[in-house]
Amino acid sequence: MTILRFQHIMSNEIAKRAFISRPPEPPASVLLNDPFKSIFIGNTKIFRVPFTWSFLNITNPHIAVVGITGAGKSYFVKTFILRANYIWGTNAVIIDWAGEYKAWVNQSGGTVVSLGKGSYINIMDLSGMKPLDRVKQIINSLDILTDIGTYPEQKRLTEEAIEQAYVNAGFTLSERAPEGKDAPTLKDAISLLSEKLQEGTYEYPAELENAIYRLRQFAREGEDYFARKSTLELSKLVESGLVDIDLSALSDDTFRALAALFILQTLKELMRAEVWSESKGLKTFVVLDEAWKVASDEKSDAVTIVREGRKYRFGLIVASQNPTDINEAIFSNVGTNFMLRIKFEKFMNYLQGSLNFSDFIRSEIGKFGVGQVAVVMAFQTALRFPETFLLEKVKGEEPLYVYTIDLADMLTQSEISSGIIQREYQFEKDELKNVLIDCNLSNEDITSIFTTFDQQDRNFKMNDFINSLRSHGARVGDIISFLKNLGIPDQLITRIMGAQNG
Ligand SMILES: Nc1ncnc2c1ncn2[C@@H]1O[C@H](COP(=O)(O)OP(=O)(O)O)[C@@H](O)[C@H]1O
Ligand SMILES: [Mg+2]
């Protein structure tokens, strides 16, 4: 006897139940926002829906981008901030650890500030702050970057000397500094400590010596990037379009981090000074690309910007090849995660653990090519669709190079003039790269073939192309499957391969 019974039911009723399966992607109504108020990123992998990003339906505008070197993090960030600028007039301040954005920002008409190469910041500059608050920030940075936290007496001495330097320069510690008044520098604070040491009355001279030594590393001749009059107008930073703070010329990571922390502190102050406005869109994106301790330390203002940014229309974009370098507080507070290719299991475990995506997504991430990405969004409402989905590829602004393989040398005159046989085959760079990978060529071989291609205006005659594949070690079988995949008739394949042997 059967207890199975059929029921008459409307399909919308069934849809409401959603009991059998979850859809593989969020619905188009979520993915596709008003193109005048959102940023196009790329098409989804399964349903090919154009995904446009808007911060309106997610918990906050902050973004994390992770992936191995070369996966396409910086490319994504460039595409993203450029479009945000078109759509909302959003400003961007890029803290550019490795100088990766310099050329692009120049090209896009933005401003590049190369610290250590003609540009300096005085970390005692106030940009409208109270000296007391700035002193706290400086000590906080030293806490993150040096061992000062383990020596309370040295910390106290350093703090006092910095305060005294402000007082000697005519500032009142607890009052907002007037515009245009020059701040003292760390060199002044060091002089005060040295004088104290020379007086010989202080009980623990070793503590003084160490405090002086620690500060001196930021004020040495030639490395005094932070102890000279500032050459940039900090107060304009958040409203100057595209600004690249290039840190690559600084001589080590501690200097880069100090600059980055200082810029973040300043941005935070400027952010808090923002009057709330009704206007739509985002005012400023702060970009931290590969920023080491700056993104990982709890005390860093990257964390503050993430916590408070939404209400001031400030967004933080943090990109890193090592997701464990991104502080938990940041990671758990970003509204959108873009995961490009990840290789290391421990990073994958970490990401899967905190973002909760399926094993299917996990295995896809491990196989990604350049620009392919999994997106995780924290939507504001509880939903019945997945928050993680795949994009075919980040569609960027770069010129799309087309590579052509020309069969003319393999065809008879009448075949060419009759047009029954396709003469040219065109590929996008990645498509062609995949062909070469399928032929089991090594990375060096692939690069070498592309170099030849580029030298010939991205054109290859079929015969020469096959020759080149073979001289790089491709097997005949693989070459034949490639030709078959192009849809070339067998007869012609025989002719092409025959030309090889002859
Ligand atoms: N979505 C994409 N489409 C086309 N080219 C890309 C894409 N993403 C990255 N690339 C190219 O790949 C290379 C590495 O990208 P990059 O963004 O510098 O990687 P990462 O910052 O992750 O190390 C660059 O030459 C870049 O132009
Ligand atoms: Mg990069």
Image (spheres, rainbow, N blue to C red):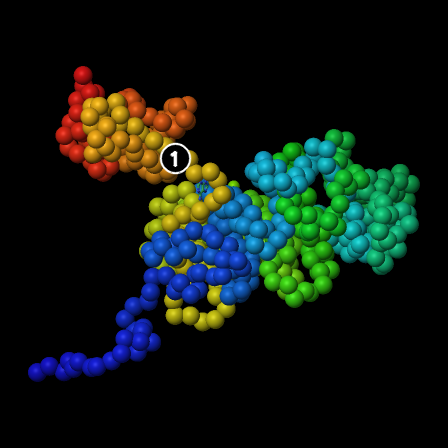
Q: In which quarter of the image is the C terminus?
A: top left
Q: Is residue 326 left or right of residue 483?
A: right
Question: Which class describes the residues within 10 Å of circle 1: few (<14), some (14-19), or many (20+)?
Answer: some
What amino acid type is highlighted by mark number 1?
Val
State the residue position of label 1: 402
The quarter of the displayed image where residue 456 is located: top left
Of 411 and 59, nearer the camera is 411
Looking at this rendering, what residue extends furthest in the top direction? 502
**x then y, percent, for residue 337:** 48, 55
Of 197 and 360, nearer the camera is 360
Count the numbered circles shown. Answer: 1
Q: In which quarter of the image is the N terminus?
A: bottom left
Q: Residue at point 62% right, 49% down?
A: 92
Above or below: residue 480 compared with residue 277? above
Q: Residue at point 73% right, 60% down?
A: 273
Q: Residue at point 50% right, 68% down?
A: 380
